[in-house]
Image: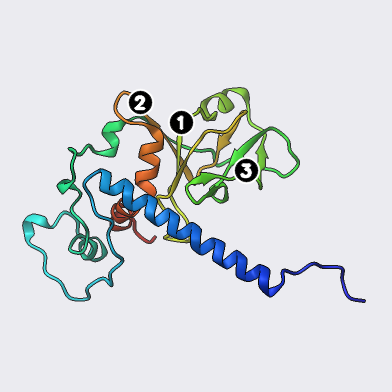
Amino acid sequence: MVPNIWLPTERAQAEIADTRQRIAEIEDQIETEFLAALGLTKPQRVELPKVFAVSWKDFERWSVSYNQRAVTSIDISRGRYPLRRLGECLVAMQYGTSEKANQRGAGVPILRINNIKGGAIDTSDLKHIDLRAKAISSLLLSDGDILVIRTSGSGDLVGTCAVFHEQGEFVFASYLIRMVVDRGIAHPDYVGYFLNCSLGRQQVEAMSRHI
């Protein structure tokens, strides 16, 4: 007996692939214009040099990968505006809970690594967690909080983030970091977008490490 399963036709698959390609092109154009407004150029992906030289005055960290990227990175200080360190724009940083979540729907919904997708929060696959009221109050997310993936089996995910704008009560898991932006200095959505864009990734990839 053949299962009653629907499969996309070749035409549908081609349309899906074409739509994805157009989305990627639009996103690329948006990022290019965003960086241009800051007086910056979108970096091109280049193969990291196997042999390179770094002056001692530029040797900030004892790491081959860090210095490989340092010699191929775009200097963001050449942009149109002065720079501020990310830490100067934050009023708080916090790790999430390591308590075990459940699929029974008991407690409050908890955001995990797989809920951070493409720079946005995806609530299609939620788990819940049953915590004491005091723990819940300390972990409840507020509008504008930035959730950053701090560790992952995939290096491409480390440091990616999403800005929380969901309705209702949510807490977050331990593989995420909550950053609260000082809105007198920066807008959370701007910070989140920059961290996810190619120049933000350029810095994250230089500092991240395998453990």
Which residue is denoted by mark 3 in the rendering? 123
User: Residue 144: image x %, image y %?
Assistant: 46, 31
Which badge, 1 or 2, comes first in the chain's sequence? 1
* Residue plotted at (46% across, 32% down): 145
Quarter where residue 4 is shown: bottom right
Are the residues at dot 1 and dot 2 in contact (C-beta closer than 8 Å)?
yes
Which residue is denoted by mark 1 in the rendering? 144
* Residue plotted at (51% across, 35% down): 164
User: Residue 69: image x %, image y %?
Assistant: 24, 62
Is 89 rendered above or below residue 177? above
Q: Please state if 181 lies on the left or on the right of 1 as rendered.
A: left
Assign a secondary structure to mark 2: loop
Assign a secondary structure to mark 3: loop
66 and 130: which is toward the camera: 66
Assign a secondary structure to mark 1: loop
* Residue plotted at (66% across, 43% down): 127
Which residue is denoted by mark 2 in the rendering? 183
* Residue plotted at (36% across, 38% down): 190
Quarter where residue 130 is shown: top right
